[in-house]
Amino acid sequence: MTSQPATGERRRDADRTRAEILEVALREFARRGYAGARVDEIAELMRTTKRMIYYYYGSKEKLYIAVLEHAYSVVRAAERDLDVEHLAPVEAIRTLAELTFDHHDAHRDFIKLVAIENIHEAEHIRKSQALANLGTPVLGVIERILEAGKASGDFATEADAVDVHMMISAFCFFRVANQHTFGALFGRDMTAPEHRDRLRRMVGEMTVAYLRGDQPPPQSP
């Protein structure tokens, strides 16, 4: 009879192997796209075999979907951990925008994956039941901030949580996804360290200004 400790160790080994495959595959899909990434190259980078990867994931498409599920789960976990409930509405939405900026800056391979999946018109995301059920915790956070801002009189604009999320994400996403074309056309690397703090402040202030509408900021006492 197989002992429980041995069974548990095998399970941990399998979990580690699956995690390592996802880590390497994420980098390769982000670098080469779905069409360009090759399972045999992923296996070579891991010093394993295609057969082992197919044993865990079944096919290249299933591996790619698993990579997407993993990448989005990291984003959703970060959204669930957002701690802005104790802040006043203006500071809360500014902080949320800046945290989104930080996340996109720190997870650039995720940005590439999203861009690639948009080229495929979300074909693979639509096949994932896990992603369909993952939800978007950040929308609930934004809705609560908007409600508090309307109640306090800080926000004059009738805003929709999805629109606000899109506005914040668009700025943060563009900075990473379009850094190379923007740099070639305008001679500025938007991801360079000297621009980071200014752009981070900009997305927060842009969001606050939109939500305030024509309402002037409160005067200092």
Image: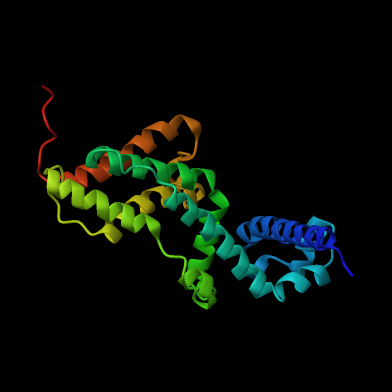
Furthest toward the top, the residue is 221
User: Going 62% across and 67% down the picture, which residue do you hit?
Assistant: 66
Q: Is residue 183 visible?
A: no
142 left or right of 124?
left
Quadrant containing the C terminus is top left
Is 210 situated above or below 10?
A: above
**Residue 37 or 152: which is nearer the viewer?**
152
* Residue 50, quarter of picture: bottom right
User: Going 48% across and 67% down the picture, which residue do you hit?
Assistant: 118
Furthest toward the right, the residue is 1
User: Going 49% across and 40% down the picture, which residue do you hit?
Assistant: 191
Query: Residue 210 at x, y = what percent?
Result: 20, 47
* Residue 31, quarter of picture: bottom right
Query: Residue 188 at x, y = what percent?
Result: 45, 38
User: Going 37% across and 55% down the picture, which residue do you hit?
Assistant: 138
150 left or right of 16?
left
Query: Residue 148 at x, y = what percent?
Result: 19, 48
**Residue 88 or 40: which is nearer the viewer?**
88
Q: How many marks?
A: 0
